[in-house]
Amino acid sequence: DAKTTQPNSMESNEEEPVHLPCNHSTISGTDYIHWYRQLPSQGPEYVIHGLTSNVNNRMASLAIAEDRKSSTLILHRATLRDAAVYYCILRDVGAGSGAGSYQLTFGKGTKLSVIP
Amino acid sequence: DSGVTQTPKHLITATGQRVTLRCSPRSGDLSVYWYQQSLDQGLQFLIQYYNGEERAKGNILERFSAQQFPDLHSELNLSSLELGDSALYFCASSVGTVQETQYFGPGTRLLVL
């Protein structure tokens, strides 16, 4: 899997928007960009994913640069519950064959702290 | 609640012992993944099963083994335990296709003394 680079930590005030950056300069054309987060003492949970176009869901938005070498996860209004480690992960849809043979490769992620 | 269940939640054992961790995937999911999370190594993929068959192997030690049963639940067996095996072990499941979201269980915290 291609490598991603994220800041180790970020802080945000509660109810403010948060922009979590991810660099993936070696991304290939078949790599999807996935974001997962891990709240304290819990397993990781899916946040959002995309390929080329910006994506929105009820949890967040994903903004993908035109050259796809970077992306930004946007939390529109941070709450205390959003304090977690956020992982940016590339998944190659073109690798291998068969169904379901693609594990997630986690880096160190960004630890987001939300200040009340 | 992700729909993935793991038992036990906590496990304390001694070096040299053997333990079995159990995972029940979400209803309808055919793939089960095992991950290990330790302080120094972070979250690492161990092994994946798809519909009863081993599909992919990651950084799994030879002392560790897993299987997926016909009812799709999975077990991770850890033997000859060492202090360094102390970690959180997560199970995840997905329907099975490449881009399917993986849903993680709450994990089993293993402490080897």
Image (cartoon, rainbow, N blue to C red):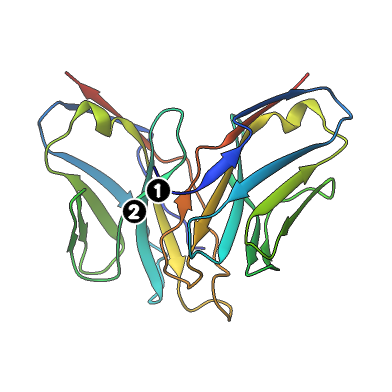
Q: Percent from the top left, x then y, of residue B54?
A: 71, 67
Amino acid identity at mark 2? Asn
Q: Residues within 10 Å of mark 2 (few under 14, many from 20)?
A: some
Location of mark 2 (residue): A23
Residue drawn at x 78%, y 25% is B83
Q: Kindly identify which chain the residue marked by label 1 belongs to.
A: A
Please give left or right for residue A115 compared with residue B72 in the image: left
The quadrant of the image that shows the C terminus of chain A is top left
Location of mark 1 (residue): A5
Residue drawn at x 74%, y 33% is B85
Examine the rendering and report whether any part of residue B93 can be seen: yes
Q: Percent from the top left, x then y, of residue A22?
A: 32, 50
Numbered circles on residues, count: 2
Q: Residues within 10 Å of mark 1 (few under 14, many from 20)?
A: some
Q: Kindly identify which chain the residue marked by label 2 belongs to.
A: A
Amino acid identity at mark 1? Thr
